[in-house]
Image (tube, rainbow, N blue to C red):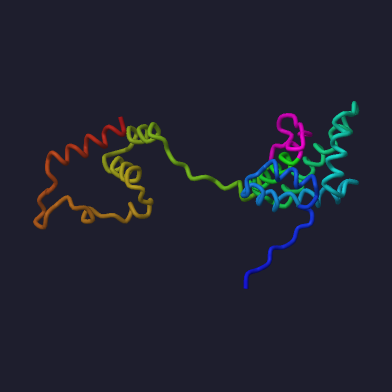
Amino acid sequence: MPRKAKIQPWKNDSAIVEWFTKIGNKRTIKNYSNEFPKFLEFVKANSQYKTRSEILDARRKQVRSEDVKERRVFEDLVIAFKQSLEGKDKKISTVRSYLRTVMSFFAKHHVPLVFSRNELKIEPCEKDKVIKEWIPTNEEVRVLYRTAHDSRDRALLLMLYQSGFSEVDVEAMNIEDFPFYDDIGNWKIKLSEHLYHARHRNSLVR
């Protein structure tokens, strides 16, 4: 039996209806529907505003104020909201998505939030601090090739660079693993093919 959709009364608020109508895109509306309640809960817990309409009414009055602190009430709330998400070890992409949702709500009602540079800079969580694998550029491979100690080192370098094999795989390879010789030990790769491969590889490391 299919599960009934959970009723979300907050979506009936006129401010939300107007916002979603202006967006139009079903996928975007679905994402915003999942994220915006988190901001509403934060605002309710940290300010005097309890409904979506109250938030907008207050914002419209505040943007006309000459008092900078009053004019930036919601900017300050959004910064605090961002910090609360960072404190929950949310990934940068997740925090950015929440902020985008909040910014859309105010912008679609013609009272956009205004931030100075870096005010919404997101601090990376532990999940974002993964040490990325170093992938050398073509120029770096050329330098390594030129400074290799001997032909064996150059062969290993090209094998790793061209094949995508791991260091463990290459280390375990033997000459017998390659079809260079026939059953009686004669070199069986055609000279033209051998030269082609050599030229091709040389062109990569010039």
The residue depicted at 29 percent of the width and 54 percent of the height is 173
Q: Does 91 lie within the magenta span?
A: no
Q: Is 193 situated left or right of 77 in this image?
A: left
Q: Is residue 188 above or below residue 59?
A: below
In the rendered image, residue 10, in percent from the top left (x then y), is placed at: 79, 53
In the rendered image, residue 96, in percent from the top left (x then y), is placed at: 67, 43
Of 37 and 87, the residue lying toward us: 37
Q: Is 160 situated left or right of 90 in this image?
A: left
Q: Does 118 lie within the magenta span?
A: yes
The residue depicted at 84 percent of the width and 34 percent of the height is 72
The part of the image, by quadrant, that contains residue 149 is top left
Q: Is 156 situated left or right of 8 in this image?
A: left
Q: Quadrant of the N terminus?
A: bottom right
Q: Which residues are magenta?
A: 106-122
The part of the image, by quadrant, that contains residue 183 is bottom left
Dominant secondary structure, magenta:
loop
Q: Quadrant of the C terminus?
A: top left
In the rendered image, residue 55, in percent from the top left (x then y), is placed at: 84, 43
Q: Is 12 situated left or right of 190 in this image?
A: right
In the rendered image, residue 180, in percent from the top left (x then y), is placed at: 17, 50
The residue depicted at 87 percent of the width and 28 percent of the height is 64
The residue depicted at 31 percent of the width and 33 percent of the height is 205
